[in-house]
Image: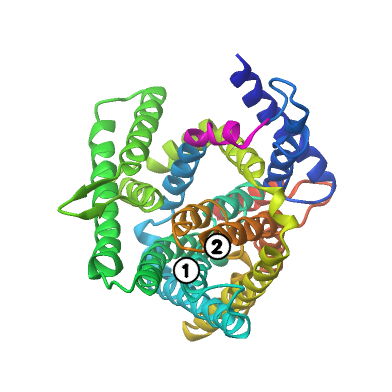
Amino acid sequence: MTTLVMLAVALIGGLLMSRIAKKLNLPAVTAYLVAGLLLGPYLIGRLGVPGLGFGTEEEVKSFDLISQAALGFIAFTIGNEFRIEQIKEMGGRAILIGIFQAVITTLVVDAALLILHFISPATISVASAITLGAIAAATAPAATLMVVRQYKADGPMTKLLLLVVAIDDAVGLVLFSASFGIARVLESGHVSAVTVVLEPLIEVTLSILLGSLIGLLLHLTEKFFHSRSKRLSISIGFVLLAIGISMMEFEVAGVHIGFSLLLVLMMCGTVFCNVCDFSEELMGRVDGWTAPLFVLFFVLSGAALDLRILSNPLVILIGVVYIIFRSVGKYSGAFVCCAATKCSPTIRNNLGITLLPQAGVALGMAMTASQLSDGAIVENVVLFSVLVYELVGPTLTKRALISAGEIIPEGKTSARTKNEKRERKLHIG
């Protein structure tokens, strides 16, 4: 019973906080995260009132399944942006920008943290420096998607952004796997081609194959149902199936086999939307069903943020360096890549800002990196950066999309309503 009360309080609290955020002209995502912080174990949850907030970190972690499910549906939704007509229009450009801005970000953060290591070797090890550089490549697709949805953003940059964010996480996964493998080699002195090269390639390949297979099976199964409610139910069932399988891990002949949840669900959504002729209508229904799930995801993400890290000066120092140079890497990487691929000045000047949010994927990488000798520093630095990026990132994304002319600023009529009207006019035209 207490569990249901906690979920209800989290959902209602997040939605009420979004009303306050609206008055302050802030995105709803930021409101949900702040609500989570307030309900977390360091503020309201600390009072110890059953059901009112999350009393301990363990209570927050007990809801990880909800967070994983929400992340899966977010990835599935982003995968639906990879429609053949859009890929033909800007697919090559999105792939180039997605890959190279991630690589540039990693190199910039690596350089900054390695310089910090050489200035003060006790501050951070080389292994942790290059691991943090790879984690810097990851962008949070959830926050970006929620801002796009809330304000009904639409236009060339929005379409490009959703494609780049999807590619970004796949590239980030490969960069992290390779960098973390090198970091472990530096600490142990034992070179393993399996860890550095083979396992990342297997994970990416199997994730793409699994997602494609489930997307195709979803399409074939949908044909047996004709009512909208049953098609919605079977779609949700297959997405949950994909999430469940992608969370499995095992070993074969000493090689670690796993899947990337984001990559599996993105691929599932991509295949489904391109082979099913009514996928767009169905996705609209899925979006309505998942709305409360997404609110809970961000409230739980806010509750999971550890405020104790703010008391560690070393974490703050490395975190500030990480945030500054990751921001420089994202912005400059996107700027250079947009210029090279002949994007419009509007996209070139604004795209990098929308790539700043960082959350779940980076935290997952940081948990893996905690195996390093000073891995606790890596984990806490990423926690600190997530705290900053998740509170500031959605607002910056919104402003960048307004600057690009793809969100109409709030006035007496909501931006959402205006953009919906604009969308209908374009559709009719």
- The residue shown at (44%, 61%) is 169
Near mark 2 (Cα within 10 A), the count class, few <14, some 14-19 or many ≥20, is many
Near mark 1 (Cα within 10 A), the count class, few <14, some 14-19 or many ≥20, is many
Q: Which of disc 1 and disc 2 is earlier in sequence? A: 1
Q: Against 36, is 406 above or below?
A: below
Query: From the image, which quarter does the N terminus lie in?
Result: top right
**What residue type is disc 2 on?**
Val
Decide if residue 412 is on the left or right side of residue 31: right
| The stretch drawn in magenta includes residue 57 | yes
Q: Can you tell which mark lies on residue 378?
A: 2
Decide if residue 322 is on the left or right side of residue 169: right
Most foreground residue, 366 or 118: 118
| The stretch drawn in magenta includes residue 385 | no
Disc 2 and disc 1 in contact, CB within 8 angstroms: yes
Provide residue 277's location: percent of width, then percent of height: 33, 43
Please give the count of numbered marks on the rendered protein. Answer: 2
- The residue shown at (74%, 25%) is 48
Disc 2/disc 1 C-alpha distance (Å): 8 Å
Residue receiving disc 1: 131
Most foreground residue, 370 or 1: 370
Provide residue 181's location: percent of width, then percent of height: 35, 68
- The residue shown at (66%, 74%) is 321
Q: Against 23, is 58 above or below?
A: above
- The residue shown at (54%, 66%) is 156
Q: Which residues are magenta?
A: 55-66
**What residue type is disc 1 on?**
Thr
